[in-house]
Image (tube, rainbow, N blue to C red):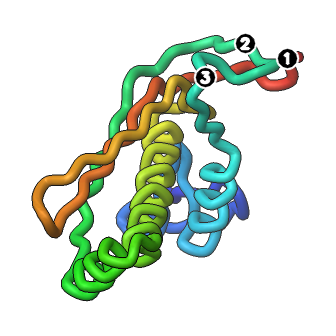
Amino acid sequence: MARECEKCGKKEGLLAGEHTEIAGKLYCKSCAPRVLDQLLRDVVITTTPQVEGHRIKKYLGLESVEIVIGTGSWSEFTGDLADIFGTRVSAFEKKLKKARDIAEKRLKYLAIQRGGNAVVGVDLDYTEFDKNRVGLIINGTVVQFEEGIS
């Protein structure tokens, strides 16, 4: 039995393994990245308990993503200098921004895998493990909201 890409219709044999499953649907190697990128863009992340203008029709559960980043020797050195002179530490800021972007993308991916189109009540926390490692934890409730409700 052949499997077929949901987007382009490309078929392959059952054992070929060329299709990727995303949110319960199969996509070929060329369509999967584009489909996933679009799905990730469409997932809403909000700190509020609902998506404004939309009614939540289903709560799908709590999801959490944890990221630990090493700050590195150079960041430590420039951070120490910035501390002495009372300036901002852009190396740390860039690493924290990158970690937040990765965490948000993973949270959206988990929402898609659960069949959701939003994550509500999102909370983002940072913690320091030791001098060279920072942790970021992001969590929220995955939901499915009704489209077109205002």
Q: Amino acid at mark 2?
A: Arg
Report if residue 16 is visible in the image.
no
Q: Amino acid at mark 1?
A: Ile
Residue 55 is marked as: 2
> In the picture, residue 76 is in which quadrant?
bottom left
Q: Which residue is mark 3?
A: 48
Give the CA separation, mark 3 to mark 1: 17 Å
Q: Earlier in the sequence, mark 3 or mark 1?
A: 3
Q: Secondary structure at mark 3?
A: loop
Q: In x, y percent, where is residue 59?
A: 51, 15
Q: Residue at point 72% right, 63% down?
A: 8
Report if residue 60 is visible in the image.
yes
Q: Nearer the viewer, mark 2 or mark 3?
A: 3
In which quadrant of the rendered image does the C terminus lie?
Answer: top right
Mark 2 touches mark 3? (CB < 8 Å): no
Choose between 71 and 28: the one closer to the eye.
Answer: 71
* Residue farthest to the front, as pictured: 85
Choose between 147 and 28: the one closer to the eye.
Answer: 147
Give the CA separation, mark 2 to mark 1: 7 Å
> In the picture, residue 79 is in which quadrant?
bottom left
Residue 53 is marked as: none
Q: In x, y percent, where is residue 15?
A: 36, 65
Choose between 77 and 148: the one closer to the eye.
Answer: 77
Give the CA separation, mark 2 to mark 3: 13 Å
In the image, 68: left or right of 140? left
Q: Residue at point 65% right, 14% down?
A: 56
Q: Earlier in the sequence, mark 2 or mark 1?
A: 2
Q: Residues within 10 Å of mark 3 (few under 14, many from 20)?
A: few
* Residue farthest to the left, as pictured: 130
In the image, 69: left or right of 29? left
